[in-house]
Amino acid sequence: MVTPVGQDTARAQEAFRALMGSHPAGVAVITTADARERPYGFTCTALCSLSLDPPRLLVCAAHTGNTLPVIAERGTFVVNLLHTAGQRAAQSFTRRDVDRFAQVPWERSGVTGLPVLHEDAHAVAECAVADLLPSGDHTIVVGDVLDARMVAPDRAPLLYGRRRYAAWPM
């Protein structure tokens, strides 16, 4: 990261965190499983569509997390787009001191067999890794969408901004 003139790195990072924190984003939990079928996951707001042809999206995963290596090894992952009642799932998957999957109901998906947060997601996309692009302290994970479905289309999406959760006004 280029540090602005006259600012130290910590101050530049805090300014960037404040900037991005002021921009609300949808909340997702990214899930996968290792070779022994042990589930992994993390909360993500750095997610967007990338391409319609082929259907592709991208998520950004921290290098310090334990899920990125599993995604890279397994080659598949699930994007669980959370609805407003999914705030507990969002909070659980940010914590490192708990068994994240013991905190929320989940089931195996039909296409990849990976964890789906069926009670907390309003939509789900199962993806195959198309590319991994390291950038800064994260890796951009490009996923080819294998299956996309609405789970609870009547539920409002969960948003996060200014360090708090909110509902999409519908």
Image: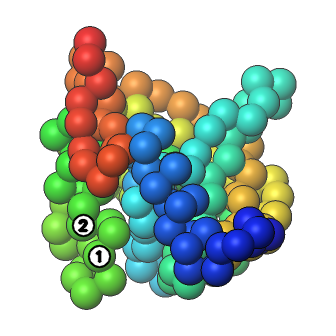
Residue 86 vertical placement versus 38 (above, below): above
- The answer to whether residue 36 shows anywhere in this view is yes
Report the residue at 62% width, 53% height from top: 59
Report the residue at 74% width, 52% height from top: 142
Residue 144 left/right relative to 103: right
Q: Mark 2 points at which residue?
A: 92
Q: Which residue lies furthest to the front in this view?
A: 6
- Counting from the top left corner in percent of width and height, residue 44 is at 47, 55
What secondary structure is found at the residue carrying circle 1? loop
Report the residue at 22% width, 82% height from top: 98
Question: Image quadrant of residue 84?
Answer: top left
Amino acid identity at mark 1: Arg
- Counting from the top left corner in percent of width and height, residue 31 is at 46, 61
**Dot 1: within a 10 Å radius of its alpha carbon, few (fewer than 14), some, or many (20 or more) residues?**
few
> Observer-nearest residue: 136 or 7?
7
Residue 160 left/right relative to 137: left
> Observer-nearest residue: 43 or 119?
43
- By what rule are the colours in the image chosen? rainbow
Question: Image quadrant of residue 140?
Answer: bottom right
Q: Do the residues labelled 2 and 1 touch (CB within 8 Å)?
A: yes
Q: Quadrant of the N terminus?
A: bottom right
In the drawing, what numbered circle is on residue 154? none
Marker count (numbered) = 2
- The answer to whether residue 113 shows anywhere in this view is no
Residue 68 left/right relative to 120: right
**Dot 2: within a 10 Å radius of its alpha carbon, few (fewer than 14), some, or many (20 or more) residues?**
many
Amino acid identity at mark 2: Ser
Q: Which residue lies furthest to the top in this view?
A: 170
Report the residue at 24% width, 36% height from top: 166
- Counting from the top left corner in percent of width and height, residue 45 is at 48, 50
Q: Name the residue under label 1.
A: 95
